[in-house]
Image (cartoon, grey):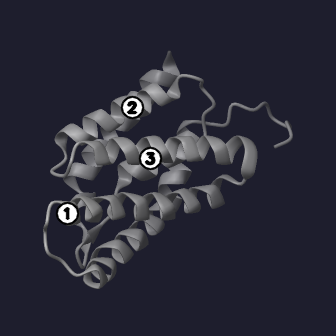
Amino acid sequence: MPFYLLTIISFIVTLMLQIGIVSRAVLLAGSADVMLLFIAAWSLHQDRKNAWILVLAFGFIIGSISAGPFFIPLITYMLVFFAAKLMHHQIWRTPLLSMFLLTFFGTLFQNGLHLLVLWVQGVGFSFTEAFTNILLPSVLLNMLLAIPVHALVQELFPSELPVGAPL
């Protein structure tokens, strides 16, 4: 029970930071997504079986309050969650490097999905300008914020492995 309460409180605090501060700090036309970083770090540091339900709820909440299409945050957050679980259990057990990979590919996927939706809707834009003005700055900002978010989540949600257990 304390785990779920702490997760919900952390989500609300992260949401307020995203809405109030981080979304206003833009580089060219790209901005950071602290929710994506929180979900990536949180997914790497917990081992609950039903945690995907929380990520699904978080995706619904973010999708309902965002200006973009409803399904983009939902798909992105679920994909990042399942990729984090796969990395944590089977591929790579170095959390910070996994965090960087999840941040990089999650940001590219999310912004690429936004651009794909705009292209399908018939909005005219240059892919090279979108890449240099939106995708690359967003990746840079997310990579810069990945370390502090990972450190905070690691302190809030310590590993569930006993001390001395092999990774």
Query: Which of marks 3 and 1 precedes in the sequence?
Result: 3
Query: Where does residue 39 sit, x and y in percent of width and height?
Result: 46, 44
Mark-to-mark CA distance, 3 and 2: 14 Å
Q: Nearer the viewer, residue 8 or 61?
A: 61
Residue located beneath label 3 in the image: 38
Q: Residues within 10 Å of mark 3 (few under 14, many from 20)?
A: many
Q: Relative to residue 35, is residue 29 drawn left or right?
A: left
Say above or below: 53 vs 21. above
Q: Is residue 130 left or right of residue 105?
A: left
Q: Amino acid at mark 3?
A: Phe
Q: Nearer the viewer, mark 1 or mark 3?
A: 1
Percent x, y of residue 68: 19, 52
On residue 85, which mark appears?
none
**Residue 152 pos. (x, y %):** 51, 48
| Residue 116 image-quadrant placement | bottom left
Is label 1 or label 2 in front? 1
User: Is residue 31 something that shows in the picture?
Assistant: yes
Q: Is residue 14 visible?
A: no
Q: Which mark is residue 56?
A: 2
Tell me the kind of residue under disc 1.
Answer: Leu
In the picture of the structure, the residue carrying the numbered disc 1 is 118
The structure residue drawn at horizontal position 67% and vertical position 36%, both measured from the top left corner, is 159
The secondary structure type at the circle numbered 2 is helix
Label 1: which secondary element: helix
Q: Closer to the camera, 81 or 7?
A: 81
